[in-house]
Image: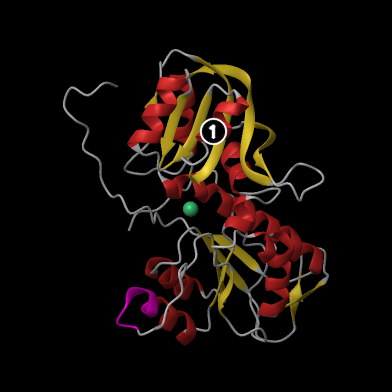
Amino acid sequence: MLKVADEGRARRDRCAPGRGHRFSGTDQAGSLLSVPRLSEVIAALENLWPAERAESWDAVGTVVGDPEQEVTRVLFAVDPVQEIVDEAVELGAGLIVTHHPLYLRGTTTVAASHFKGRVVHTLIKNDIALHVAHTNADTADPGVSDALAGALDLRVVRPLVPDPSDPHGRRGLGRVCELDHPLPLRELAARAAARLPATAQGIRVAGDPDATIRTVAVSGGSGDSLFDQVRAAGVDAFLTADLRHHPASEAVLQSPLALLDAAHWATEWPWCELAATQLDEISDRHGWDLRVHVSKTVTDPWTSHSPSPGAPN
Ligand SMILES: [Zn+2]
């Protein structure tokens, strides 16, 4: 099983695990810690990423879970797949928070003969809840693209596609960013490759490697529906994932826009760290005995990459 490299990742293991009653111990300052119920943790998550801010086609919120159950450990991950659920069982987590929905288009069965039904069975048998924050986390402030920009030390200027319902103009899809010190495209790509978790794909690049990059649009996850807004923003480069041949080809023929295409999973994984930090802060404020973890399991479906002999580098 592939894992995200360990270095520099903050651990959040300060508190003792709960022992099944409401007040379970004290923190370093000697204050009593209480074990939160799932409903309390979910309320905190809903406050960060309200379900009504998700796209109409999306499926966010709690998929599995008993509101009355106590939770002492939470695991954040991008994908609600069996490897992640197995990791939560091992960890003793009572809640998994994922970015991607388990059932985006609904289902008529949770039979364990199907891989998604197997996930549901494992969750319920082990008293583990599953909560999803997807497009409501994409557009949040801070959201998925803030985490992506932060991983590359890009300074966020504004949303790429502002949410008209936000009077402060901070929520929305994607982010327009500036580099404090302009970089050649090749160095920005190298930074993305080094700072995002390692995947078989790495970073695909379109554009002159010596082109100077001062401004970058970023969008975690699939970004090729955003080319009109990226062009309108007048940025030097666009960092996203899942770029298809025709939209990418047309984008680079229309303007000198440089493209950086990372693995979808890698562009969204930094949000897990951001979200975990947010929940950790909430937990501290409430005096909860809650340990918050980020999965380092690589759930990108691509497992290897064979460079073409003689390919441009
Ligand atoms: Zn995604």
Start-end of magenta stretch: 112-118
**Magenta stretch encompasses residue 249:** no
Residue at the extreme left of the image, as rendered: 309
Q: Residue at x 40, y 34 (%)?
A: 247
For residue 46, above or below residue 71: above
Q: Secondary structure at mark 1?
A: helix
Instruction: Give percent across and percent down for residue 116.
Output: 38, 74
Q: Nearer the viewer, residue 11 or 302?
A: 302
Q: Quadrant of the C terminus?
A: top left
Instruction: Give percent across and percent down for residue 203.
Output: 39, 34
Q: Nearer the viewer, residue 144 or 247?
A: 247
Q: Residue at x 61, y 85 (%)?
A: 66
Instruction: Give percent across and percent down for residue 14.
Output: 66, 62
Q: How many marks?
A: 1
Left or right of 38? Residue 99 is: left
Residue designated by label 1: 228
Graded by Cα atoms within 10 Å as few (under 14), some (14 to 19) or many (20 or more), the crowding at tag 1 reads few
